[in-house]
Amino acid sequence: MTAAVVTDTADPRVLEKLRALDACAVSDALDSLGLPGAVTGIAPMWAAPGVTVGRVRTVKAVPVGGDGPSTHIASPLVAVAGAGDVVVVDNDGRTDVSCWGGLLAEAATVRGVAGVVVDGACRDVQECEQLGLPLFARAAVPVSARGRIVQRAMDVPVSVGGVTVESGDWLIADRNGLAFIPNGRLDDVLAAGLRIVERERLMGEAVRAGRSVVDVMHDSQFTAARFQEPTS
């Protein structure tokens, strides 16, 4: 696998646009475009406020003893992470051993990391909460990674909940769950997501004005909602 070329910091303009959405709107946008991206089974480990958005940086974890180079999970990536990055660790969904903990969280916070996603288990949840570092995983366990799993590679394509994710892609996550946006389809997903948000706003107005929710929820209603981004 070839490592991605990643610049120093996530584009703040992209982060601002993503913050206007939520995981549900992005999931719906991906559906409308026929794209995968929404992941099930991974949940927030503590109730971080608002939405977590950022540019993906990937880590692949493997059991100790495999062929090839290995190092302590995520430490080389965290050491060079940029502000607005999201660390995404692929541990094949294992929940019997942690691959994220308190010291990594401390270092990630210093680097300005926006959040962490683990397809597997984590630990030291309370430390992440104290640091204000959003953390999403399949489970929390006290079992250390040392002597059990190691990092095989970083900034390579990984699989998270069956979705292929690459460094340079984008994440949006909240209490509903999380969704990944392929970097090459970012503009399409943002446009579709903003239309969905506007459509739902109009639907809410209609319900509050007294229209029947049966009528409002009908597929033939509110199909032409459009969102025009400001020019300045």
Image: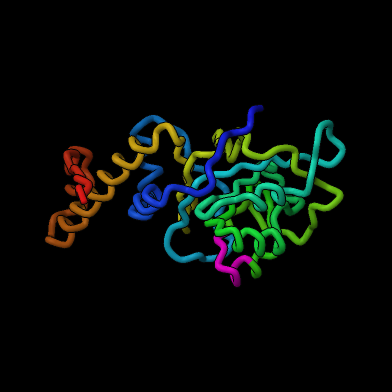
Q: Is residue 52 visible?
A: yes
**Residue 4 figure quarter:** top right
Q: How is the image coloured?
A: rainbow
Give the residue displayed 59% in from the left and 61% down from the top. 45
Question: Which residue occupies the foreground of this view, 182 or 141?
Answer: 182
The span shown in magenta is 128-134
User: Looking at the picture, does residue 230 appear above or below residue 210?
Assistant: above
Q: Where is residue 13 shown, x and y percent of the image?
A: 36, 50
Q: Is residue 129 magenta?
A: yes
Closer to the camera in the image, 53 or 231: 231
Residue 43 is left or right of residue 205, and the answer is right
Residue 166 falls in which quadrant of the image? top right
The x, y position of residue 99, in whole percent, is: 72, 51
In the image, 223: left or right of 155? left
Instruction: Give me the residue at 71% from left, 37% from top.
Output: 153
Residue in front for this viewpoint, 131 or 232? 232
Whether residue 22 is visible, yes or no, is no
Query: Dividing the image into 4 quarters, which one contains the N terminus?
Result: top right
**Residue furthest front in the image:** 8
On whether residue 11 falls in the magenta region, the answer is no
Left or right position of 97 against 175: right
What residue sits 65% from the left and 52% below the top?
Answer: 78
User: Is 111 situated left or right of 72 in this image?
Assistant: left
Q: How far from the left and from the top, in percent, is residue 125?
A: 65, 65
* Residue farthest along the bottom direction in this orientation: 130
In depth, the one of 177 and 208 nearer the eye is 177
Above or below, 53 relative to 126: above
Name the residue rendered at 43%, 47% in the picture.
11
Residue 61 position, x and y percent, is: 72, 42
As displayed, is residue 92 above or below residue 175? above
Task: Judge whether 224 appears above or below 79 on screen.
Answer: above
